[in-house]
Image (spheres, rainbow, N blue to C red):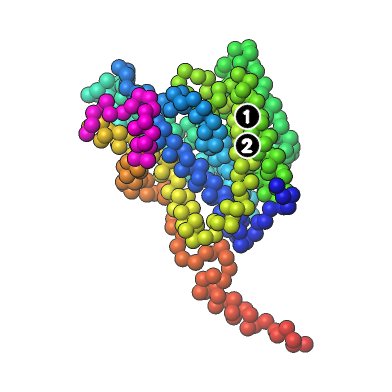
Amino acid sequence: MSDSTHDSGPTSGGPVAGGRNHYIDFLRAFSLLVVVAWHWVFTIIIWKEDGPHATNPIGFTKGLFFATWLLQVMPLFFYVGGYSHLKSWQKAQQRGDNIWRFVWARVKRLAIPALALLGVWTAAGIALGINFDLEWIGKLVVLIVSPLWFMAVYLMLVAMLPIFLWLHRRFDVIVLVFFGGLAGAVDILRFRYGYEWLGLINMVFVWGLCHQLGFFYDRLAAATRRVDWALLWAGLFGLAGLVFSGLYPGSMVGVPGERSNMAPPTLCIVALVLFQAGVAEVLRPSMERRLPRPQWTQVNEVINRFSMPLFLFHTTGMALSRAVSYAIAGGENEATKPTGWWWLSRPLSFVLPLLFTMPVILLFGRRWVKPDKKGPDRNRPGTDRAGRDRACTAAKALPSATST
């Protein structure tokens, strides 16, 4: 573990002059793909008399909960979101924007597509309920729109951005300490004294801490490698201590029949975000050397372009693919617990929902696809022809270095 500082500059995958941070874009794209892949690959639908119920293989497979320590990436996503919101606000400030107009614009950009999806599926559920059992249809609709909880929390964090920015300016890193302490206090009141309703407050303290941690990304990137490893191990040891104390479940995703670390979030998520931020920083130098390569850049840009509609419609595509498979093979074709064949068929469980999600995006989600930035990299001055011509003209106009 070298104690040298990180390399970051225009030639790396990090911030470029006047441009985006490519590594942050990569973390956002990676987080999104993990969430979508988790839902597609590891969702087990169990059919009961009152309708469909969702579970996952963690409750059936001993030790699999360890995988969620890396694959439950919502804390990492909120961490990246905090950094992005801070940088976007700083740019908006330079343009003379005010915080309330900035927040409202971001809220609208996120809320409109989420509410549109929710409204369409609610209307479809009511229409289907006329001919089918309304309770059964209601459970189906809830399963399809359930990932929107993430959008609700993210909108809350955006709406609270003025408060978070003030806290950051006024108290700096102390905010993280107090948010962590308050999250722990809420858990104590819940688990020892039975005040379960207080868990909702941790939606602010825990997710707010993850978001606020992103404000310190630049400092972490400039710190020595030992800080990265210290953050990783502190988060990992803290998470292991909480889980093996017996007070918290090992899984970072919900498992039927167990208390959840996510709904509402617990102190485990605080340890988890420290661990994941540490992992992200440990990997950052090597990733920054790869990201400028054309293949990496193209994949990174495509995923980020389609991030919003992919997240919104991936459960719709999954529902359509399941409906077709049920129609062909019958409802009995789905295992109610993992079997050998179930594990072997996991690649197929990713491909089929993807094939059904893509047409849905093309039909209904194109308006939320980010524009394609083709051509030369506009973040690097002089790479386009006009830029080179301007640079040449300016160079000719300069006096010679040997002139007096």
Q: Residue at x 44, y 24 (%)?
A: 60
Instruction: Give the residue displayed 57% in from the left and 49% down from the top.
Output: 24
Closer-to-camera residue (70/219): 70
Q: Which mark is residue 239?
A: 1
Q: Residues within 10 Å of mark 2 (few under 14, many from 20)?
A: many
Magenta run includes residue 339: yes
In the image, residue 260 above or below residue 177: above
**Does 199 sit above or below residue 216?**
above
Where residue 325 sits, quadrant-wise, is top left
Q: Earlier in the sequence, mark 2 or mark 1?
A: 1
Kindly give the residue lying farthest to the front in the view shown.
340
Magenta stretch: helix, strand or loop mostly: helix
> Where does the image place residue 220, in percent across and percent down from the top left?
68, 46
Between the C-alphas of marks 2 and 1, the distance is 8 Å
Residue 3 part of the magenta-drawn span: no
Q: Which mark is residue 370?
A: none
Task: Determine which residue is flagged by label 2.
Answer: 275
Task: Name the spot of residue 197 as percent of width and height, x first.
Answer: 56, 17
Residue range highlighted in magenta:
328-348
Tell me if residue 301 can be seen.
Answer: no
